[in-house]
Amino acid sequence: MSGGHFDYQQYRINDIAQEIEHAIEIEESLPGKSIYDRIVDDGEYRNGFSSKTLDEFKKGVKLLKEAQIYAQRIDWLLSGDDGEETFHKRLKEDLDKLK
């Protein structure tokens, strides 16, 4: 397995992004519902956040995904798996995939 400089902790960043995406899905699944109707399914709660707040959640998800890519690419560079040229090439490729 490649990398390891950060003890593979960069994957936790992606886990956080996925949890936020799930929270967004829950919030958007019941538009117009009262914040007092909080239980959705399986004990999950809806908080009734505004669209303005959910837009900020979405920005946060994008930034977290970018951060995970940077952490991964830097990890491979510091671990000696990639050289600088490959680092820049793969970083650009990975960031382009997000768009």
Image: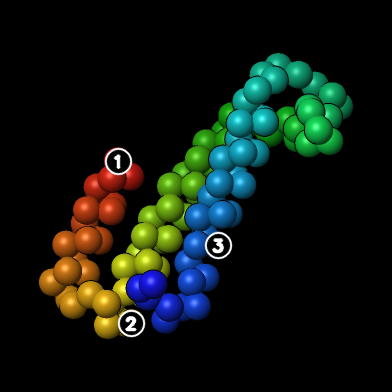
Whether residue 88 is visible to the viewer of this picture, yes or no, is yes
Q: Which quadrant would residue 88 be assigned to in this image?
A: bottom left
Residue at 75%, 32% in the rendered image: 46
Disc 1: which residue: 99
Q: Secondary structure at mark 3?
A: helix
The residue to which callout 3 is attached is 12
Using the numbered discs, state the Cα–Cα distance from disc 1 to disc 3 in whole angstroms: 21 Å
Of circles 2 and 3, which is in front? 2
- Where residue 67 appears, x then y in whole percent? 41, 61
On screen, 18 above or below 50? below
Q: Is residue 53 visible?
A: no
The residue that label 2 is drawn on is 79
Whichever of labels 2 and 1 marks the residue nearer the N terminus, that label is: 2
Element marked by disc 2: loop
At x 28%, y 52%, the residue is: 95
Look at the numbered discs 2 and 1 and tell me whether their residues touch, using CB distance below 8 Å: no
| Amino acid carrying mark 2 in the image | Ser
Which mark is drawn over residue 46? none
Q: Name the residue at 43% across, 78% down.
A: 4
Nearer to us: label 2 or label 1: 2
**Separation of marks 2 and 3 at Cα, in angstroms:** 19 Å
- The answer to whether 73 appears left or right of 58 in the picture is left
